[in-house]
Image (cartoon, grey):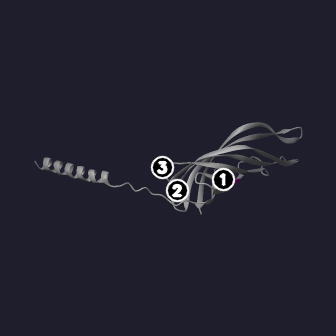
Amino acid sequence: MKNILFASLTAALTFSFGAHAQDAPVKRLSYPPYRIALGILGNPKALGVQAEARFLKDFGARLAGVQQFDYQRANEYGGGGVALLTYYLPLKNKLIEAGIGLGAVYSLYHWDVGYDKGNLQDVNLGGGLGVNLRFSPNFRLGINTLVANGFEAGYVEDNMRAVRRKLLLVPALTFDVLL
């Protein structure tokens, strides 16, 4: 009898708490809009800085500069710059920012084979997409992917040249301060 009484009391309390929980209004957390974001981005092969300016509610421009670290020869290095016009997808959850960008990608590759050295430079079309999570009014974290029409370098006719094109997918983690 005790078990039946306990089960009945538990069921009654559960249903009454459930009814109150369903009637309670849902409070959506929303942070104030921002105009400028400054931050860092990185992955195991590269590290960089980025800046973003929003000029409309759903449109902005992003700039990033990156230094790459995964070269085989000691005196070789590379880097790049990205300028994207970005559209931010309107979502119901204002803590999540999803964006798609299209713009230009600049690449620099400094090569050094001991007896000869030089620079390869390239400007090409690129794009990006990503998702950011705002975890406070002034900070956000994200994962973004750059898509670019890159090149592969090779030593041809006593000089380093771009020997073929290849599609580059470069994921990066980002951390931004929102101003």
Q: What residue appears at the point 27 percent right and 50 percent down from the top-left corner?
A: 18
For the residues labelled 2 and 1, the Cα–Cα distance comes to 18 Å
Q: Position of residue 139 (x, y in %)?
A: 55, 60
Residue at 27% x, 51% y is: 19
Identify which residue, 107 or 86, lies in the foreground: 86
Of the pair 55 and 13, the residue shown nearer to us? 55
Picture coordinates of residue 89, whole percent (x, y): 56, 47
Q: Secondary structure at mark 3?
A: loop
Choose the circle earlier in sequence order: 2 or 1: 1
Amino acid type assigned to the residue bearing label 2 in the image: Arg
In percent of the image, x 59 and y 58: which residue is there? 176
Q: Residue 130: percent from the left, percent from the top?
A: 59, 47
Q: Is residue 114 left or right of residue 145?
A: right
Q: Residue furthest top?
A: 164
Disc sitting over residue 92 in the figure: 3
Start and end of the magenta stretch?
61-65
Residue type at the position of mark 1? Ala
